[in-house]
Every structure is written in structure tokens, then in C-alpha cells.
Amino acid sequence: MPSMITASILVLGSIAALAVLFSRHTSEAAAMSAEETVTRMQEVSFWQDFFGSTYDHIAAYWGLELRPQFLGFLAKRVGWFRIFVLRFEQQLFKLAHRIRTSSTLKPKPSEYWQDVHAWKNGNGDGILVHRETETPETVVAAVLAAPVKKRRASTRKNITASFALEHVEAVFEDRHL
């Protein structure tokens, strides 16, 4: 309650001081002629001149010095924020991909793709050769013992055996040079 009393005393005192300031020169203003009033109103006061020149100096300093620095700083921050958003977007993309892949079952590869994978891991001619342990004879035996798929006629074993007999010795010799 005492703070309210103090605040209301301050408000009333401020209003009284403003009334005194505004009414102080009213008798002089009433005694002036119209020409004198016009000339006084056209004159620039000290404070108007001071604030006008200060504003001009600040505006020039802003235009020449501060504005380019501020815009450079702002461009760096916008670039940093853009990179942050891109990284965050990439993390969200990875998270969505992990969620998507963990929710679906992965099918086992078909026999065709298993054969292709085995061929790629071999020596390039469709025959898997272990360099240290296998000889041309064991490779031929492995080729002949391999399961046959019904792709063509039953001549596959004969074609494979003749291919193995002709080319395995050359491949084996090339690898052991």
C-alpha cells in the first residue's frame, strides 16, 4: 500500500511539473505578433539540429560500415542454419530408412542370384578354384559333381566337362606363375 501512495504522488507531481512547463511562456507567446511567430517557428532549434546531424552520421556509418558487416554475418548464419537443416533432414531420412527396412522382411536370394554371386567370387570363368589346395583334376571332379539345373538339354554335363578339361589347366597354370 505504501508503494501505491508513493506512485500516485509521483504521477501527480509529474503532471503538475508538465503544466508549469507548458504554461510558463504562454503570456509571451500571446504578446507576439504573427510575423514573429512565423519566423520563430521556421528557426531550427539546437536540439533539432543536434539530433538531425547525429541521425545523418549514424545513417552514413550504418550504410558504409555496419550494413556490409551485418549482412556478411547474417549470410554466414543463414548458411550455417541451412547446413544444420540439411544434416537434420539427412538424419531423419536415415531414420525413416532404418524404420522402413526393419519393418519389411528381406527375401532370400533366388538360386539364380546365388549362382551369379558364386561366379563373381570365382576366377571369372564360372569355376571356383582354391589356389593352394586344388589341382586341375579336383576342379574337373567338382564341376562334374555340381548339381545340374534343367535349363537346356542334358548335354550340360558333357559341355561343362569338355570346357573344364580344356581350360582348367591353363587357368591353374596362370594362377600359379
Image: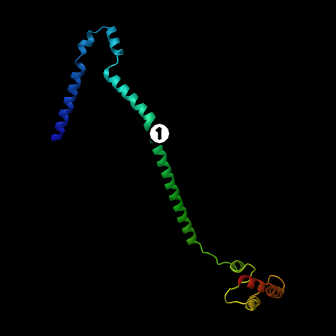
Q: Residue at x 41, y 33 (%)?
A: 61
Nearest to the observer: residue 123 or residue 44:
123
With respect to residue 14, does 102 lie above or below? below
- 155 horizontally vs 104: left or right: right
Q: Quadrant of the C terminus?
A: bottom right
- 118 horizontally vs 97: left or right: right
Residue 20: quarter of image: top left
- Where does the image place residue 145, in percent across and percent down from the top left? 75, 91
Residue extending furthest toward the front: 177
Nearest to the observer: residue 110 or residue 157:
157
Residue 111: quarter of image: bottom right
SS of the residue at dot 1? Answer: helix
How crowded is the residue under tag 1: few (<14 C-alpha within 10 Å), some, or many (20+)? few
Task: Name the residue that disc number 1 marks.
Answer: 68
- 117 horizontally vs 50: left or right: right
- 81 horizontally vs 133: left or right: left
Q: Residue at x 70, y 89 (%)?
A: 134
Q: Residue at x 35, y 26 (%)?
A: 51
Residue 49: quarter of image: top left
Nearest to the observer: residue 65 or residue 9:
65
- Where does the image place residue 3, in percent across and percent down from the top left? 17, 40
Residue extending furthest toward the left: 2
With respect to residue 72, does 160 lie above or below? below
At label 1, which amino acid type do we have? Pro
- Where does the image place residue 54, in percent across and percent down from the top left? 36, 28
